[in-house]
Image (cartoon, rainbow, N blue to C red):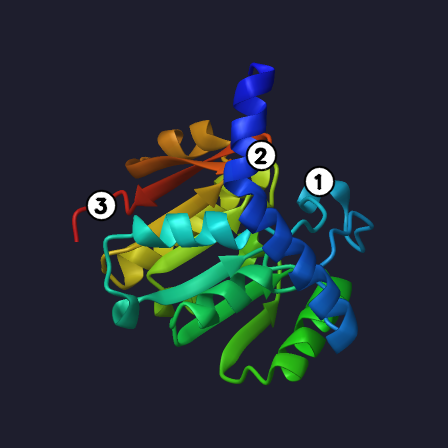
Amino acid sequence: MSPLKKLLRFIRLLPDRIKGKIFVISCKLRGLDFAADYDRDFEKSAGHGYEATTERCFRAALRHIPLPIPDIRFLDVGCGKGSVLMYARKAGIVHLGGVELSQKFLSICEKNFRILRYGNIELIRQDATTLGDVLDGYNVIYMFNPFPAPVVEAFLSRVIESLERRPREAYVVYDNPLEADVFERAGFAVENSIVVPIYYRDRKILIYRSPRKI
């Protein structure tokens, strides 16, 4: 990218950066914690550390999910400290859930939601590869690159089992899709592919529809 393009991009995204700085300061003043944290309390092979996605990325993805907001039942898999669930609640999604393996991250998430006075959010501490009936209550799954390929593959098998158990229109949002080939092998079709500019780079997001006609 040329210096001029970098400058123009910086100017265009400056309001987002200012908003982000204000948000960080506000979080500290209120006792909220959405800071990146790579100090896991689980095996590295089970998943990555925590890094909050941006609200810009979440809202861009939400615009490309072909469901009305009142009909969305939203599950963040690898929810960490809860930033995506916070964005979803702000966007008007009522039916919300999060799955997280780390007790440390989940405890911080619960504290964040107590401060924000968010109720009626289902938070589950569980290995995503062992999820069963809990998946049946959701039709949009959000993943911000939480797992390495073997875990993604095992989790998608649980998703397919859920769709067979309870047929429905369902979508998986894969933010920063480093293991996209696993979705293709599992039979998930790309509904939308979007690129979101953030600071000096672009973030790719893939939205998959369920791999069966329902």
Q: Secondary structure at mark 3?
A: loop
Q: Is residue 13 above or below residue 97?
A: above
Q: Is the residue under label 1 in contact with that under label 2 (CB below 8 Å)? A: no
**Residue at (57%, 73%) from the top-left corner?**
123
| Amino acid at the residue labelled 1 | Ser
Nearer to the camera, 116 or 50:
116
Question: Quick check: can you spot residue 178?
Answer: no
**Residue at (37%, 30%) from the top-left corner?**
184
Q: Which residue is mark 3?
A: 212
**Residue at (77%, 74%) from the top-left corner?**
29
Q: Quadrant of residue 92?
A: bottom left
Mark 1 or mark 3, earlier in chain: 1
Q: Nearer the viewer, mark 3 or mark 2?
A: 2
Mark 2 or mark 1, earlier in chain: 2
Give the distance between the C-alpha atoms of the residues marked 2 and 1, in whole angstroms: 36 Å
Q: Which residue is mark 1?
A: 45
Mark 3 or mark 2, earlier in chain: 2
Residue 192 place in picture, x, y as percent: 30, 38
Nearer to the camera, 133 or 196:
196
Farthest left residue in view: 213
- Mark 1 neighbour class, 10 Å CA radius: few under 14, some 14 to 19, many 20 or more: few
Give the distance between the C-alpha atoms of the residues marked 3 and 2, in whole angstroms: 42 Å
Q: Secondary structure at mark 2?
A: helix
Residue 109 appears left or right of 162: right
